[in-house]
Image (spheres, rainbow, N blue to C red):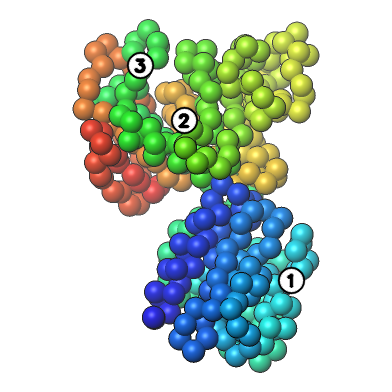
């Protein structure tokens, strides 16, 4: 197998950690000796062994003299597990092939330098763009302190997001719904506005058959209108972002651990709130809000990626999905069929 083929196997292994690894990156590793795989592993969950350690532990024979393939530069600092560079050197690995350098300031090429100093040959940049795509949330978070923002919108064929009376209406098909739940599993948090809570009373949970986790549920609610009986706040895994203008009597009724108060009075400062989420280790957020939330994210240019599900059905006398979509600058866009719906997927 070529270096590219083996690295793609590393990517496939790494993806098994989706829903568990963050805020750490997705990493897969494979050990090759005499042109055959003798070990493989991936980072299963935050706090668990890193991918290269898992791969070396699984080796069916002594890895001395073998080549280690890994999609991200090995760590060289003490975290929950010890530095992987030490284990790699101790195992007698002869060559390490990497897709991406780790942007983490604690690593950022130092892991490679340590391996080379120990006499290990290092090749980096194999399928570099694919590696960046795999860990785009982690890369953005490390470089900016902000989570990666994905917008999901479902609209009718005539561009409506809801009925004029704001009552719930089913727009997308079952296959689209399944993809949305995969997105919920993939992201650490899901965000909506209070109007969605009041009109739909959603659970905002991940309902895959083999679900891995439910994301942190976030409600933007400037005046604190969220009812205590809402399905979204049924357990402790939620956060309400509000303002100094919030109803003070209602504020006292909420556990303060579930409340973030924006320094602004009229509406939540999205930039400051996203900075707060990043400081809490949230690397990715799925925005599923209504038109007001969508337009606010567009206006402040906070969207990184968009999934637009278009149903063949029409909604008469409905609400347009956005008043800002004509100003979008999309770098790359793909269109596909998902059941009876059309999916427009774009990177901003």
Viewer can see residue 266: no
Helix, strand or loop at label 2? It is: loop
Mark 2 — residue?
Answer: 288
Q: Does residue 141 appear to the left or right of 207 in the view shown?
A: right
Mark 3 — residue?
Answer: 169
Q: Does residue 187 lie above or below 128 as drawn? A: above
Tell me the distance, in whole angstroms, between the alpha carbons under discs 2 and 1. Answer: 39 Å
Few, some or many C-alpha atoms within 10 Å of disc 3 (few <14, some 14-19, many ≥20)?
Answer: few
Q: Does residue 138 lie above or below 197 as drawn? A: below
Q: Residue at x 70, y 43 (%)?
A: 280
* Whether label 2 touches label 3, CB < 8 Å: no
Say which label, 2 or 3, has the lower sequence index. 3
Q: Front-most of 345 and 230?
A: 230
Report which quarter residue 57 is drawn in.
bottom right
Q: Residue at x 43, y 79 (%)?
A: 3
Say which label, 1 or 3, has the lower sequence index. 1
* Whether label 2 touches label 1, CB < 8 Å: no
Few, some or many C-alpha atoms within 10 Å of disc 1 (few <14, some 14-19, many ≥20)?
Answer: some
Q: Does residue 76 appear to the left or right of 55 in the view shown?
A: right
Where residue 105 sits: x, y (%)?
Answer: 68, 65
Q: Residue at x 53, y 74 (%)?
A: 30
**Number of the label disc, if any, that sits on residue 83:** 1
Say which label, 2 or 1, has the lower sequence index. 1
Few, some or many C-alpha atoms within 10 Å of disc 2 (few <14, some 14-19, many ≥20)?
Answer: many
Where residue 17 sits: x, y (%)?
Answer: 56, 54
Helix, strand or loop at label 1? It is: loop
Q: Does residue 87 appear to the left or right of 313 in the view shown?
A: right
Instruction: Name the quadrant of the N terminus.
Output: bottom left
Tell me the distance, in whole angstroms, between the alpha carbons under discs 2 and 3. Answer: 15 Å
Q: Front-most of 296 and 131?
A: 131
Where residue 164 sits: x, y (%)?
Answer: 34, 10
Helix, strand or loop at label 3? It is: loop
């Amino acid at each position: 197998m070529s270096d590219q083929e083996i690295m793609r196997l590393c990517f496939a292994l790494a993806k098994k950690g989706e829903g568990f690894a963050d805020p750490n990156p997705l990493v897969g590793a494979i050990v090759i000796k005499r042109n055959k795989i003798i070990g493989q592993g991936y980072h299963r969950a935050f706090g668990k062994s890193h991918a290269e350690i898992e791969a070396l532990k699984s080796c069916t024979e002594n890895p001395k003299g073998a080549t280690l393939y890994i999609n991200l530069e090995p760590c060289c600092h003490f975290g929950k597990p010890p530095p992987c560079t030490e284990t790699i050197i101790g195992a007698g690995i002869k060559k390490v092939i990497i897709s991406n350098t780790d942007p983490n300031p604690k690593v950022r090429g130092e892991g490679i330098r340590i391996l080379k100093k120990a006499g290990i040959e290092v090749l980096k940049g194999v399928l570099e763009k694919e590696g960046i795509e795999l860990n785009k949330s982690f890369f953005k978070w490390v470089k900016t302190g902000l989570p990666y923002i994905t917008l999901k919108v479902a609209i009718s064929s005539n561009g409506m997001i809801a009925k004029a009376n704001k009552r719930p209406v089913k727009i997308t098909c079952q296959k689209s719904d399944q993809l949305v739940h995969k997105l919920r599993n993939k992201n650490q948090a899901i965000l909506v506005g209070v109007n969605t809570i009041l009109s739909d009373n959603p659970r905002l949970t991940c309902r895959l058959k083999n679900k891995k986790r439910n994301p942190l549920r976030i409600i933007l609610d400037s005046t604190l209108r969220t009812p205590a009986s809402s399905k979204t706040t049924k357990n402790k895994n939620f956060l309400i972002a509000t303002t100094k203008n919030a109803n003070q009597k209602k504020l006292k009724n909420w556990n303060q651990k579930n409340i973030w108060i924006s320094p602004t009075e009229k509406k939540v400062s999205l930039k400051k709130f996203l900075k707060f989420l990043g400081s809490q280790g949230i690397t990715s957020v799925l925005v599923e809000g209504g038109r007001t939330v969508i337009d606010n994210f567009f206006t402040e240019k906070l969207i990184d990626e968009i999934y637009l599900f278009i149903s063949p059905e029409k909604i008469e006398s409905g609400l347009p999905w956005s008043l800002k979509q004509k100003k979008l600058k999309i770098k790359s866009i793909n269109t596909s069929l998902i059941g009876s719906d059309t999916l427009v997927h774009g990177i901003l």
